[in-house]
Amino acid sequence: EIEQISALKAQIIALLEQADLPADAPLQPRAPGQRIPLTVLQSYIWNERMESGCAIRRDTSFAVRVSGPLDASRLESCMGAVVQRHEALRTRIVVDDAPMQCVDASYQPELQLIDLSRIPAECCEEELKRTASEFLGESVDAGTGPLFAARLLKISHIEHVLILATDHIVSDGVSLQILNREIWTLYQQAQRGLNFDLPRQAVQLGDYAAWQQRTYSNWLKTHGIRSEERRVGKECRSR
C-alpha cells in the first residue's frame, strides 16, 4: 500500500492543490476542553479492528541496544518527561456515541526492568527475543490504556535493550524513533546536571485531529453541495 501511495504522489499533490481548502483554517492548538475526534487514519484503523474483532496490542515498537553503565531510574524519569511532552503517548480511545481521543493530564510510565543477566550467554539472545515478543503480544484495553509502554532488558551490568512500544492508532515507527532520540537527549542533559530542555511543542496530535475535522467540515459546506448538485443534475439528464 505504501508503494502504491508513493507512485500516486504527484496525482495526490495535484488534487490537494486543486482542493480549494478554506484559507481561514490554520493548524493551531485546539480550544481547552474541546472534544478530540479521531483522525481519518485513526478512524480507518479503529473501524478495521472493530470489524475484524482483533485484540488491540502495542503493535508499533522501537528497540535500541545500550552499551555502557546505565542509570535506569534516571532513564525512567527522562522517559516520563518526554511522555508528558507528547499528548499522543498519554492518549486513550474511548467510545461516547463515537470513538474519541482522551488525553490523560499526566501519565508516568513505569520502566519495568527485566533481568536476563543470569541466563547463560548462549541462551540470552533467544530469551531476549522471547521476552520482547511476549511484551509486544500483550493485549491492551484502548479505553483504559496505557497504549504506550516500555521495557528495559538487562543483559549485563553494561549492556541493556530498551524497548518502546505503542499502538499504531496513536503513534508510528518514525514517532517512536523521535521519542527515543528525545529520551536520550534528556538523559545526557541530566548526566551533566542540566535542566531538561527541548524545543517547545507547537501542536499535538489532538490539535491536528480537530483541525482535520474542521477543515473537512468547511470543505463540505461548499464542495459537498456542489457534488450533490452535480449528482442531481446528472440524474436529471439521464431521465
Image (cartoon, grey):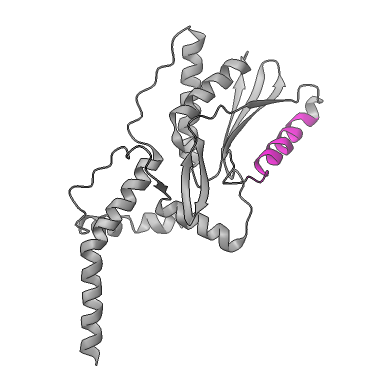
Instruction: Classify 8 as above or below 31.
Output: below
Residue, far top: 193
Residue 199 image offset from top left, x and y in percent: 35, 23
Instruction: Classify 120 as above or below 37.
Output: above
Where residue 13 sits, quadrant-wise, is bottom left
Indicate left or right for 5 with 215 as reference.
right
Tell me which residue sits at (54%, 30%) in the image: 107
Indicate left or right for 20 with 121 as reference.
left
Whether residue 178 is visible here, answered yes or no, is yes
- In the image, is residue 47 part of the stretch drawn in magenta? no
Residue 164 image offset from top left, x and y in percent: 57, 33
Residue 43 image offset from top left, x and y in percent: 46, 55
Residue 177 image offset from top left, x and y in percent: 48, 33
Q: Which residues are magenta?
A: 123-140
Whether residue 171 is visible here, answered yes or no, is no
Quarter of the picture containing the C terminus is bottom left
Question: In terms of depth relative to the viewer, which is nearer, 31 or 157?
Answer: 31
- In the image, is residue 129 part of the stretch drawn in magenta? yes
Residue, far bottom: 239
Tell me which residue sits at (22%, 58%) in the image: 19
Instruction: Classify 55 as above or below 64.
Output: below
